[in-house]
Image (cartoon, grey):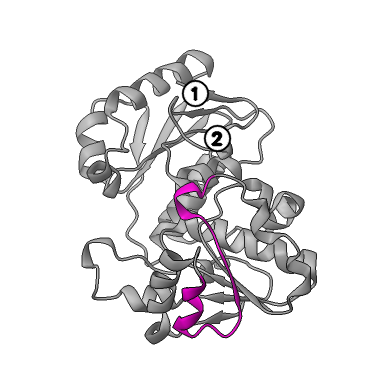
Amino acid sequence: MIRAIIQAGFGNQLFQYATGYALAKRLRQGLVLDISFFDYMKGSNADNIRVNNLNLLQLDNPEFVSTPQSYWKYRYGVLLRKTPFWRLLGFSSRVVWEDVPNCRKFQAELFNNIERYNDFEIYGFWQNTMYFKDVIADLKRQFVPNYQLTGKVSNLNSEISSSANSVGVHIRRGDFVRLGWNKGADYYRTAIDIMRQELIKPYFYICTDDKTWAYEQFKSDQDVRIIDITTATRDIDEFFLLSKCHHQIISESTFGWWAAYLNLYTDKRIIIPADAQGEIFNQDNWTKI
């Protein structure tokens, strides 16, 4: 049995599931999704509360488990991963610890001879398509909502899907502002102008975690709409609408990356920041500005 530790935001959750799923398929083992992180973090980090959103996707036979009282072992274990002392924390099976600071590099050596183990856990972010390159078609089939779109979301889906020139724009601010990773208005305006030059009457749908900032920046643009959804499934609804656009302009966030990566249009136009780090951004026909 393979246990994938699921944590952080939705984009990271997709990478973690994708890597666990690919390993389970390759080794013909079962897959358990450990979501202890979300219960563990409640009340301990009120400024950055995350929720498990994988349960809203049409995954193949998902099995979720949560033991928040023991999650602390992973937080310390990853710090001790290069020493034998992590075993003193009481892990009952082998753990594959990713070198987290290099999570966008393909760390193939971590899985050398993994076939010999019937039970193991994987802890990391696994932000590299090489981990799941053989099951990408399977993943694209699963990474859709497992519920019926209704109301405003359904209407937006129809509107976006019927346009060959719909452009999804993902603006990540929030913690990216604090970390200095956010892109300013100039990046998005330049990308939007490029799309206006290359497409016939494009229409832009902005998904963002800072709607106030986006409204202030683009309130005078007649071809720009800020997607503002208040549903209980808002994160997945906005992600799905972003991915359904014919083209995308994204930040360096994995949320936006997955939306663009799941775009099924063969003539799609994707614009990304010039300084976006990692092999995941080296996709054919993606333009860096």
98 in the magenta segment: yes
Residue that protrudes farthest toward the front in the picture: 84
The image quarter containing residue 169 is top left
Q: How many marks?
A: 2
**Which mark is drawn over residue 281?**
2
Disc 2 marks a residue whose amino acid type is Phe
Please give left or right for residue 266 compared with residue 182 in the image.
right
Quick check: 41 above or below 193? Answer: below
Q: Which residue is at the front of the view, 189 or 92?
A: 92
Q: Which residue is at the front of the view, 277 or 244?
A: 277
For label 2, count other residues whose C-alpha is less than 10 Å away and answer few (under 14), some (14-19) or many (20+). Answer: many
Quick check: 21 above or below 140? Answer: below
User: Can the viewer see residue 250?
Assistant: yes
Q: Which residue is at the front of the view, 132 or 200?
A: 132
Task: For the residues labelled 2 and 1, say whether their Cβ atoms are less than 8 Å apart.
Answer: yes
The image quarter containing residue 144 is bottom right
User: Can the viewer see residue 7?
Assistant: no
- The spot of residue 19 in percent (x, y) is 63, 59
- The spot of residue 130 in percent (x, y) is 68, 47
Q: Residue at x 43, y 38 (%)?
A: 252
Q: Secondary structure at mark 1?
A: strand
Q: Residue at x 46, y 58 (%)?
A: 10
Q: Which residues are magenta?
A: 84-104
The image quarter containing residue 59 is bottom right
**Which mark is drawn over residue 288?**
1
- The spot of residue 240 in percent (x, y) is 51, 52
Q: Which image quadrant: the C terminus?
A: top left
